[in-house]
Amino acid sequence: MTTTSANSKADWRAKLRQKTAKTARWLHIYLSMVSFAIVLFFAVTGLTLNHPDWFAGSVKTRQSEGPVDAALLKATGGSEAEQAGLIQSVRVREHLHGAVADLRVDDSQISFSYRAPGYSSDVIVDRQKGTYSLTEVRNGFVAEINDLHKGRDSGKVWGWMIDVSAVLLTLVSLTGLIILWFIYKRRTSGLLIAAAGFAVCFLVYKIFVP
């Protein structure tokens, strides 16, 4: 290999390192800014989930009853589409929200629920009497954000948001490691600290988790 070709190869490698480091730094900065709110949200809700007694809020329960239009009770199927009129009627009358869940239909009654983060409403319809009874539970703001953290009763779009958040945080971590790799004076100590962090988490899990 000639000196010229060796120098060209060395220059190519140097440029590649510089480009990689620059790209990783750019991604790390802007991904961190984009995911700042996400990191803050999941950090705060991680604390509220781990210490529910610190943030115990007042649970508000409401019970109600009312008549049901006889025409809405004619459907005998157990699908949401078949009971859509009844479900919507109770929703509008009682000002309820959330996705429909747990629909059950038999000869004597129809029952269904509305579910949302930190919220539930359970409805039982007496088909013979043509009336419904409702129990609505609002668990408060902290319960709502805790359910959002877990993706409980939050719908597909929020589920996608959690997936995107996970990808963003993974990329932030990986670009941080790439940047550290190119900081030669701090690379060894930084990687050792990162390894120590992993080791501490693993040891706490092995020793203290039942």
Image (tube, rainbow, N blue to C red):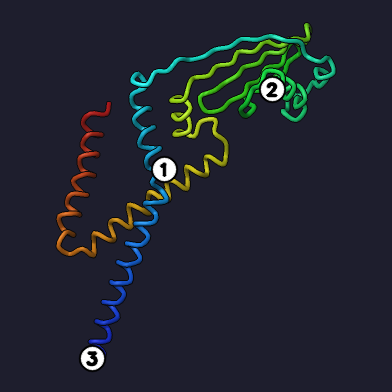
Q: Residue at x 23, y 62 (%)?
A: 181
User: For the point 75% across and 27% down, which residue is it?
Assistant: 84
Specify few, some or many for label 3: CA neighbours under 10 Å numbering under 14, 14-19, or 20 or more.
Answer: few
Q: Is residue 83 left or right of residue 193?
A: right
* Closer to the eye: label 1 or 3: 1
**In the rendering, at what x and y percent does residue 134 appear?**
64, 13
Q: Position of residue 116 (x, y in %)?
A: 56, 27
- Residue at numbered disc 3: 1
The residue indicated by pointer 2 is 91
Q: Quadrant of the C terminus?
A: top left
Task: From the image, tell me which residue sits under label 1.
Answer: 38
Which of the two discs, 1 and 3, labels the residue nearer the N terminus? 3
Residue 167 placed where, x, y %?
43, 50
**Mark 3 or 2 closer to N-term?**
3
Marks 1/3: CA–CA distance? 52 Å
**Element type at mark 3:** loop
Q: Is residue 17 left or right of residue 49?
A: left
| Tag 1–tag 2 contact (CB < 8 Å) | no
- The alpha-carbon separation of the residues under discs 1 and 2 comes to 32 Å
The reply, left or right, for residue 135 in relation to residue 65 is left
Residue lying furthest top: 129
Q: In what element is the residue under mark 2?
A: helix
**Identity of the amino acid at label 1?**
Ile
Badge 2: how crowded within 10 Å, few (<14), some, or many (20+)? Answer: some
The quarter holding residue 188 reads bottom left
Instruction: First in sequence, mark 1 or 2: give its number.
Output: 1
Q: Which quarter of the picture shows residue 27?
A: bottom left
Amino acid type, callout 2: Arg
Against 83, is 14 above or below? below
